[in-house]
Image (spheres, coloured by chain):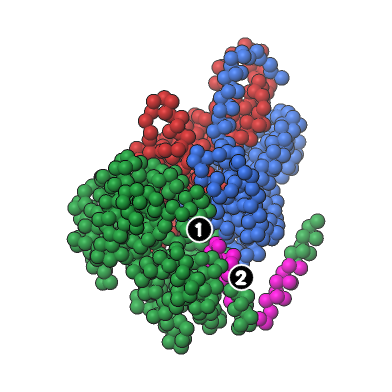
Amino acid sequence: MRKRKVGIVQQIFVHGFLILASIVTATPFFWMISTSFKTPQEIYTIPPKFIPSEITLKNYVDLFKGVNFGRPLLNTIIIALIAPPLSILLNSMAGYAFSKFRFKGRELLMLLILGTMMIPGQMTLIPAYLVVRFLNMLNTYRGIIIPGLVGAGSIFFWRQFIKGIPDEIIESAKIDGANELLIYFKIILPLSTPFLVTSFVFAFIGAWNAFLWPLIVATDERMYTLPVAVSIIAGQYGENIGTILAGSTLVVLPILIVFLIAQKYVIRGIAMTGLKF
Amino acid sequence: MRNTLWEVFLFVGPSLLLLLIFTVLPVITSLFLSITDFNAYSFMDWSRTNIVWFQNFIEVLHDDLFWKSVFNTIYAFLLAYPTTIFFSLLFAFLLNRKETYFKNFFRLLIYLPSVTSTIAVAVVWSWILNPKYGLLNWFLSFFGVPRQEWLSDTKWAMFAVVALVVWKAIGPNMLLFIAGLQGIPEELYEAAEIDGANRWQQFFYITLPGLKPILLFVSVMLGIGYLQLFEEPYMLTGGGPLNSTLSIVLYLYQKGFRAFEFGYASSVAFILFLMIFGLTYIQMKLRIYQE
Amino acid sequence: MRKTLILILGLLLVLTSLSSSQVKTIKMWAMGEEAKNLGIMAEKFEKETGIKVEVQALPWTAAFSKILTGIAGRQLPDMAMMGTTWMAPFSAMGAFEELNKYMSKSNIVKPDKFFPASWETVVYGGNIYGIPWYVDVRVMYYRTDMLKEVGYDKAPATWDELYDAIKKLSQKYGVGKCGLGLSPTEAANFLPFVWQNGGDIIDRNKNILVKNPEFIEALEFYSRFYRENLVAKGGANVFVDFESGLLPVFFSGPWMISMIKEQVPKITGKWAIALMPKKKSRTSFVGGSNWVIFTTSKNKDSAWKFIEFMSRPENQLEWYKILRSLPAVKETWKNKELSEDPFTKVFGEQLSDAKSTPIIPEWDKIETALGRRVEEVCLGKKDVKETVELLYEDLRKILKK
């Protein structure tokens, strides 16, 4: 462990700055939670009250009255549990190949794959929907999960991280007779724990919050996900903002739990591997 | 030694196949539409679509609103891109210091914007920026700054949009940088210390080179994302006032999803594609990112 | 674990296939609050006809994209509720069934049973593509107490009175502290002034009318509030500003009533609604929702039965009681529940002098151009004369005249 003497002034400055920054960044989040417990009269008071003078559960009661959460919750859990591992496996394998394999046209192919991200999603939404319909995957978990599994960004993510793993480790394993699959599972994946967790958090949040695509693929309400079900209570003119934010809070809480657990894992993962590349 | 085709196929094949079916195909379709007059009438009856070759492009290049949106997008990019990288890196360094306390707590708080619901974000930001009751004007009044109309003043609206963009982007990019910093082997620093390198030398000869791959990743993704600026102006200003926050994607969204001129919108998308591709290509070729 | 999951999923599949056996079912898309409450009407309808109604709720925020992709992929339910402003684009696509033939056989659904302005929203290119369900019409919301202070015991009834009242309020409370609520980029906010002056933006034959004196005068009047700083600027939101007095007068639809009552109960009794101000007429903007049947439907007759069911005055009344949406069928308004309600009554009166924006495929582009130019005048970037010329050119390009 490196230990350095750090001046008290520097410590105060750094921590003061971090406290200020985290207040600035976290404000809307806490406002969302506090508003979900406000009465309608207090929501629009100016300047806003961060702690409601009268805490009400009405918004949550309305929410549970208006939305049937059972099935959407089940759908979201299924999707958010199936999609991330599959997506990490596919993307990291490809990322490994793009980072360490030697084959003709590697860089060009990577650039072309990145090219798929350069057309705004608004333009590809309808064609992608037509593809899914053609494959008879409308209104199925497959139709919601599979199209989003592989992303150019994720492949690129893995390529860049695996680049940090020294070639020598791989070369020596090859000399010992290991094939690429073995190297991938025995060396690359274990060495990638922090990135694995980071990408799991991103993929989980993505799957958990997915809104437009699940809605468009669903041809009846049984395939609705949690964000879709919650958004239905939002009216055309944005009434009952308290209920909407209560819904948002409910959707977000599981993500926070996952994030907190994942944070622990990052640290444990680092401690375990010691990151001795 | 080159890898065999079989190995390449095993590792890249499945991803490539899915990408081809669900992403490349739609992208090509969308690009193809740019040489057609695909519009409202084409939806139920595709035979009513005609190939018009470069007609859309010619119209786009003569469209003053398009050029306005290009200018706005580049302006926003120039403001947001360096700011995001600077702050994400700064927070990553501060939260990766051995001597910083409550790291997990700060990391969580700074990450919160990315999990806050869009509607909460929109409402809180318009409150923060509210001229009369907003936090920002209240804060600035202590420095003698007169009351500004952040969202309805053409001078300021884009700054407001960019502030929201940066605020949302810092959390995830900070996490990536932290992961990147943690990926730099501790031994390198120990060895450097033994060799008598000071902190700045360690920073320039170990930290920065070690961060290069992830720095490239973040820069490329930010470039791709920021030139496709859409959600923030869509929810904060709707492109106004006087189209001062109209971004390219917001413009093509209006053309496509509101006026159903998908042919026209596709040619805007194609031009945007070329812009982003150029930027990405330059970034991938830049020496500062190479090992 | 996995086996149980597969078992559960399999069971669900079997159950769903069983339940949808012989009973006739129509599938429907509806949005938000309406979708959640349609079940009550669906139950009643099923009891009456034996036809089951399956409502798929769509969130307002994404309904447009959902409908558009549905049309592109021909994956549509039998019918849907459709915002009036969405009628033109989707009618142009040919997504809606033409209803003329059903109409001729029906004695419940007849054009003259609906408000004319509302009926206009279902006619596209001379054919009928929808049936009105409920209407939204904009009226004037005003603070009775504040207007009384400047000598108005009633709402300003004419353009001159409106200007005078706002001017006096601004003198009393300070320039910039008080003003009219306007929204230049929104056609539904600006166009009523043109209509009140006997003008329009285009006529039935798509002739451009923006160079006519009626249009110019309306734009002059509208932008004058901006030029003289008589517009509520820098407020927080409608509710807070209405309560604080920054925004003593604004124009909005029926949804505002319950929201004001809920959000700012402190000013209860200090506000009211009134008809739009008069120049040559008191014309307002009408919106709302219609019923449509998709061309791809295989249950068109059943879907039509549901439309007829919803158009019956007693069912229109029942729906009014559920969500307070204003009935589109005139006869329903004879009912005491509506005619004696102090708020609803005003909307009813306004409905007899209301218009919708033209149902033509180019409308969205026209609205965008109009919003851009009106905003430019209001913010002082261009003068009225120049703007009218520019707008004329915009429209000429859009309409290819």
Asked if residue C12 lies in the magenta stretch, the reply is yes
In this view of the protein, can residue A44 be seen by the observer? yes
The structure residue drawn at horizontal position 43% and vertical position 25%, both measured from the top left corner, is B142
What type is the residue that disc 2 sits on?
Gly
Same chain? Circles 1 and 2: yes
Q: Which residue is mark 2?
A: C39
Query: Which amino acid, mark 1?
Result: Ser
Q: Position of residue C321 (x, y in %)?
A: 54, 69
Could you tell me which chain the residue with mark 1 belongs to?
C
In the rendered image of this protein, which colour is used for chain B?
red
* Residue A104 location (% of width, % of height): 55, 44
| A111 relative to C122 in the view: left or right | right
**Is residue A75 visible to us here?**
no
Q: Earlier in the sequence, mark 1 or mark 2?
A: 2
Residue on which the image places disc 1: C258
Identify the colour of chain C in the image.
Answer: green
Q: Is residue C368 magenta?
A: no
Location of residue B276 with respect to C57 vertically, above or below: above
Circle 1 packing at 10 Å, graded few (<14), some (14-19), many (20+), is: few
Q: Chain of mark 2?
A: C
Please indicate whether residue C342 sits to the left or right of residue A193 in the image: left
Q: What color was chain A assigned in the picture? A: blue
Q: Residue drawn at (29%, 54%), measured in percent from left and top?
A: C162
B241 and C176: which one is in front?
C176
